[in-house]
Image (spheres, rainbow, N blue to C red):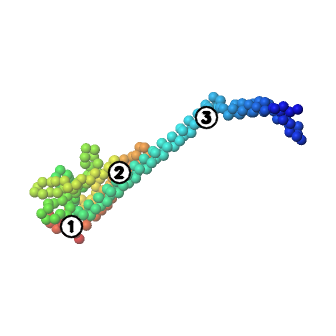
Amino acid sequence: MMGIWDAKIQGTATIYCPRRANKWTRGRLAVADFRAGTTLVEMLAYVAILAVVINLALSLFLSASRLSMLGTSGLDKMVVLETMREDFTETVREAVAVTERVAAYRADEDTLVLELPSEPGEGRRFAVFGMMGAEPRLSRLVLIEKDGAFAAERLDTYRLDLEQAGFTLDAADPAQARRASLHVVLKTDRERKTPSTGNTFWAAMRSVASDRAGGQQR
């Protein structure tokens, strides 16, 4: 006779017993719970691996950031150098003559003084290239002379660290010179370990002075 907690399946020898089933299920759950956990050794191993991965990612990030900064710095230098070349070339081409002295500036191998075209009654204009400022940097200063007094029209400073900046004329007598050159040497980049590099720019005057007050194009 079958009890309330026992059942016999016809045609088989399987007997279902809820009490035994619950005992078997609890054993399986206990094993599953034990297997799902982690030991202290495993946790320490996970932490060590995670620390290595984070350290590697941080090193790669810092290296990429440094390379990006160096690349940006090199690009900035190229832009400033190109601006310097354009300003020097355009100013020399516009000039009517090389002048030996203007105000406190005297033409020599470190300074170039040029007379620029000017309109009658507006005063004479001059351009001076040389190292200027409290922290000397190559600059272009445009001066206007009127009634014996000089006034600055504009000042352009080129933000480059230079080891050398010099000027050369194509004639011993500045009054006879028609071509001028600018030679600059950039300082060694210690971070990138690059050697000093030199650049030379040549330009020829395209104007001639018609009188002491101005000039005309030819």
For marks 3 and 1, give the CA distance: 81 Å
Image point (62%, 32%), residue name = 43
Image point (21%, 56%), residue name = 142
Height in image: 9 above or below 112?
A: above
For marks 2 and 3, give the CA distance: 54 Å
Could you tell me which secondary element the residue under label 2 belongs to?
A: strand
Name the amino acid type tagged 3: Tyr
Where is residue 90 drawn, in percent x and y?
A: 28, 62
Is the residue under label 3 in contact with that under label 2 (CB below 8 Å)?
Answer: no
Q: Is residue 161 visible?
A: yes
- Residue receiving disc 2: 185
Where is residue 21 drawn, in percent x and y?
A: 78, 33
Could you tell me which secondary element the residue under label 3 belongs to?
A: helix
Q: Which mark is residue 46?
A: 3
Image point (29%, 58%), residue name = 87
Could you tell me which secondary element the residue under label 1 belongs to?
A: strand
Label 2: few (<14), some (14–19) or many (≥20) C-alpha neighbours in 10 Å: some
Q: Residue furthest left?
A: 147
Name the amino acid type tagged 1: Val
Closer-to-camera residue (66/144): 66
Image point (65%, 32%), residue name = 38
Q: Quadrant of the N terminus?
A: top right
Label 1: few (<14), some (14–19) or many (≥20) C-alpha neighbours in 10 Å: some
- Residue receiving disc 1: 208
